[in-house]
Image (cartoon, helix red, strand yellow):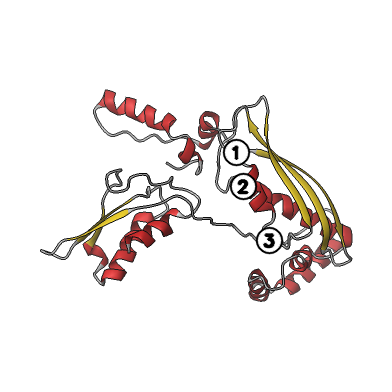
């Protein structure tokens, strides 16, 4: 677990086989800890993306049309495709009604890439935010103003923008930075306010069994998610304690198994903790 985040979904067998062999030879549990460099060499790394685009904007930087093509380098195989995920990322929180975007997975003669945190989504958001910065430079506007101009007027993101600008004293600090940069040729300062919207589609299924023991009132839970450091076991225990009205120390989480959680989907997509909490309550 860990390291490459999404890699655990599609490529866990390399580490599992190594640990199993060592455990069999040593007769004891084995945990494998790898450096990030070794992790990428063995399992792969995030796909590179090459984005071409053409945009037309008004004087305020509001996009009137945008044509963008994203090419995801998945390496020698399409084990972990990113194209569709990149499409969900590039729209971010902006008005995409005048956009035409295509994303394609491209096979090359390089090692196969692998899912990393926010696969495809990360590359898509990076692409559109680069475009927003480019637009701001051309129309000579504050990038934050350009971003706000391209967000739908009914989006809750605008409320967050306003709150952060006020709490961070954005306008005053931006004016100060501009004055500093004008007065200093070689040293520059910068500040950026960048939104991010991550779509969370619920897919697959999760199961749980909750057992309540009448003798002492203790509760055990076995769910279909995998604890990988994200705190899913703690969350599930807290939800059960709250719903049942018992102290948290009376609730314990038992190991996941395919008897009580058959056919559950992979732990990923930032949905597993919430799904297991929901099914356990």
Is disc 1 surrounded by few (<14), some (14 to 19) or many (20+) residues within 10 Å?
many
Q: Is residue 258 above or below residue 30?
A: below
Residue at the spot of label 3: 194
If you read the primary sequence from the N terminus, does the residue marked by circle 3 or circle 2 appear first? 2
Residue at the spot of label 2: 85
Numbered mark located on residue 81 in the image: 1
Q: Secondary structure at mark 2?
A: helix
3D distance between C-alphas at marks 3 and 1: 26 Å
Tell me if 15 is positioned left or right of 258 in this view: right
- Place of residue 86 in the rendered image (x, y in percent of width and height, measured from the top left): 65, 47
CB atoms of marks 2 and 1 within 8 Å: yes
- Place of residue 136 in the rendered image (x, y in percent of width and height, measured from the top left): 82, 60
Tell me if 255 is positioned left or right of 144 in this view: left
Q: Secondary structure at mark 1?
A: loop
Q: Locate residue 183: give its quadrant.
A: bottom right
Which residue does the image show at 50% across and 44% down from the upper left? Answer: 5
**Could one spot residue 79 in this view of the protein?**
yes
The mark lying in front, picked from 3 and 2, is 2
Which residue does the image show at 62% across and 49% down from the upper left? Answer: 121
If you read the primary sequence from the N terminus, does the residue marked by circle 3 or circle 1 appear first? 1
């Amino acid at each position: 677990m860990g390291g490459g985040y999404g890699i655990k979904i599609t490529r866990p067998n390399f580490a599992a086989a190594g640990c199993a062999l060592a455990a069999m030879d040593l007769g004891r549990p084995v945990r494998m800890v790898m450096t990030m460099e070794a992790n990428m060499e063995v399992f792969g790394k995030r796909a590179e993306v090459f984005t071409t685009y053409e945009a037309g904007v008004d004087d305020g930087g509001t996009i009137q049309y945008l044509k963008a093509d994203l090419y995801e380098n998945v390496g020698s195989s399409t084990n972990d495709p990113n194209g569709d995920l990149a499409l969900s990322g590039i729209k971010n929180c902006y008005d995409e009604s005048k956009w035409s975007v295509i994303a394609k997975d491209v096979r090359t003669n390089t090692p196969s890439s692998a899912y990393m945190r926010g696969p495809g989504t990360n590359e898509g958001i990076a692409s559109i935010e680069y475009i927003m910065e480019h637009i701001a430079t051309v129309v000579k506007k504050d990038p934050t103003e350009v971003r706000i101009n391209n967000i739908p007027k009914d989006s809750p993101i605008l409320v967050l923008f306003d709150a952060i600008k006020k709490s961070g004293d954005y306008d005053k600090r931006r004016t100060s930075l501009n004055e500093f940069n004008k007065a200093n040729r070689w040293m520059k300062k910068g500040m950026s306010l960048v939104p991010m919207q991550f779509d969370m589609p619920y897919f697959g299924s999760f199961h749980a069994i909750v057992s309540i023991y009448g003798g002492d009132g203790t509760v055990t839970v076995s769910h279909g998610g995998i604890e990988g450091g994200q705190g899913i076991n703690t969350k599930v225990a807290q939800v059960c304690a709250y719903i049942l009205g018992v102290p948290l120390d009376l609730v314990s989480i038992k190991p996941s198994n395919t008897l009580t959680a058959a056919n559950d989907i992979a732990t990923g997509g930032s949905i597993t903790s919430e799904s297991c909490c929901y099914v356990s309550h």
